[in-house]
Image (cartoon, coloured by chain):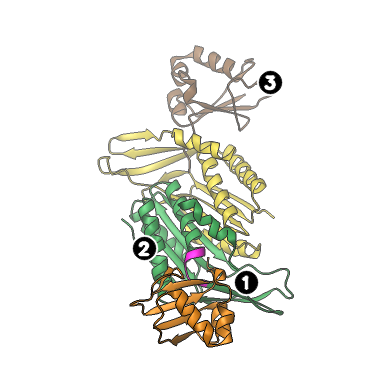
Chain colours: A green, B orange, C yellow, D brown
């Protein structure tokens, strides 16, 4: 069984509220292990006055299908219960949750690997772009070579 | 076809989306056509290694054929997560 | 900075409630990544009527110090924000959360590795023992060789 | 010293904890002493590869010395998580 829940939203979310519901669903599906990853907006200590906001742009339509494909790929590689991917777009402030993935499986190794895989693919294959705003102006976050390199672990 | 731009590509070209009538055979042909139009396009497309392309909402390559394609999007490498 | 929170308790818990509080703490500590693992009681489909309960025995005194040591070891290996380990003892029923670990770090790789490490060490180095009760009787869960082998990944 | 038993070791020996006066030099000497007492001990300690030992609440080995030790615990391999 694989129940894939993909959410792309402007609204803020509480990772704990999502995890409570996800854990109940995972338990009912017979899972013994749940792994959850949450990404948070980090402040920029170097910049004058820090990060005033982060704005995330995405590609409506493609975003949902890209996340769905990544989740389906994970479900073919590992024996998974439910899978959740949530990613925000729009304006965020430091310390806010940006996104979350949750995976469930009978055993912990599959749940850990699947969550790690989802994050690596989401980083480089889902159409999101981050822009950071400080007192000095706005800058698009550059992709890291290490993010692209991370995908080679899964080939 | 519809041509979409995201992030700094959108900002350099100055619009998020436009309708383009073109007989370009591949993505690369379309890039050359647009670059020849105006400087803002030439500037946005000056370093293709810094760009990614999606054809009908699937990540693709610059040598992908455009026959039957309805939507093409140009953007920098993704930075989600 | 490393804030280690160790809890060994009889009472049931909601992983989501813990994750909400942990995420707030992690965000305030400047973390960009939070990884959370939850273990759930799985039913035994083979047994007549399934699992009626699981009872977890532990070694009071040693349990807390073993978990503290494992968390401190993780904090020396990776650059971590707060770390949480919670493990229940006593009687549990199928689908209930048994335990949870949460880690936070600036970047996702450290948070994932630390959570994976905590789980591997907790499995084989923290003094907990599980007993499964079915209509046919009670059986102590046997340790798996694979759990001991998993530790070699970290040497 | 206090000797503690957990899980099936506790069940075989029939008690969770006892006070033992012993001049055993090592854990292994203590195991031999206890095994010589009664069958239930001999049975519990019959396969030492299936047992773990903690000395003063630290995982240890069967050849660990007992001088100054206050608490020793015998139990099967752990199955938490």
Q: Disc 2 versus disc 3: distance between alpha carbons?
A: 59 Å
- Residue assigned mark 2: A4
How many callouts does the rendering have? 3
The magenta span reads: A123-128
Query: Residue D57: horizontal and vertical position, in percent?
Result: 61, 33
Query: Residue A127: horizontal and vertical position, in percent?
Result: 48, 71
Which chain letter matches label 3? D
Q: Disc 2 versus disc 1: distance between alpha carbons?
A: 29 Å
Observer-side mark, 2 or 3, equals: 2
Query: Residue C86: horizontal and vertical position, in percent?
Result: 53, 49
Q: Is residue B53 above or below residue C73?
A: below
Residue D21 seen from this side:
yes
Tell whether B68 sits left or right of A148: left
Q: Which image quadrant for residue B40?
A: bottom right
Image quarter of the N terminus of chain D: top right
Which chain letter matches label 2? A
Classed neighbour count for the residue bearing mark 3: other residues with Cα under 10 Å, few (<14), some (14–19), many (≥20): few
Q: Which image quadrant for residue A20?
A: bottom left
For label 3, the SS is: loop
- Residue assigned mark 1: A94
Q: Which residue is at a point 51% across and 64% down the rendered structure image? A: A124
Classed neighbour count for the residue bearing mark 2: other residues with Cα under 10 Å, few (<14), some (14–19), many (≥20): some
**Are the residues tagged 2 and 3 within 8 Å (C-beta)?**
no
Task: Tell me if residue A127 is in the magenta stretch.
Answer: yes
For label 1, the SS is: loop
Which numbered disc covers residue D67? 3
Q: Is residue D10 above or below residue A31?
A: above
Q: Which residue is at a point 38% across and 64% down the rendered structure image? A: A69
Q: Disc 1 versus disc 3: distance between alpha carbons?
A: 56 Å
Which chain letter matches label 1? A
Q: Which residue is at a point 42% across and 44% down the rendered structure image? A: C91
């Amino acid at each position: 069984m694989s129940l894939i829940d993909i959410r792309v939203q402007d609204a803020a979310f509480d990772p704990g509220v999502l995890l409570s519901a996800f854990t109940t669903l995972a338990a009912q599906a017979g899972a013994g292990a749940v792994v959850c990853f949450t990404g948070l907006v980090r402040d920029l200590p170097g910049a004058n006055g820090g990060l005033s906001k982060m704005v995330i742009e995405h590609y409506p339509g493609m975003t949902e299908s890209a996340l769905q494909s990544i989740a389906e790929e994970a479900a073919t590689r590992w024996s998974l219960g439910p899978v959740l991917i949530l990613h925000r777009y729009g304006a965020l402030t430091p310390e806010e949750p940006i996104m979350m993935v949750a995976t469930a499986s009978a055993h912990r190794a599959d749940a850990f690997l699947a969550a790690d895989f989802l994050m690596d693919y989401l980083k480089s294959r889902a159409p999101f772009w981050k822009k950071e705003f400080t007192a000095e102006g706005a800058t698009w976050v550059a992709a890291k070579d290490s993010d692209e390199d991370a995908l080679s672990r899964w080939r | 076809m519809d041509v979409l731009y995201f992030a700094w590509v959108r900002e350099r070209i100055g619009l998020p989306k436009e309708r383009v009538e073109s007989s370009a055979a591949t993505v690369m042909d379309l890039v050359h056509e647009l670059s020849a139009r105006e400087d803002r396009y030439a500037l946005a497309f000056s370093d293709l290694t810094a760009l990614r392309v999606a054809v009908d909402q699937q990540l693709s390559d610059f040598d992908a054929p455009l026959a039957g394609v309805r939507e093409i999007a140009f953007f920098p490498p993704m930075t989600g997560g």
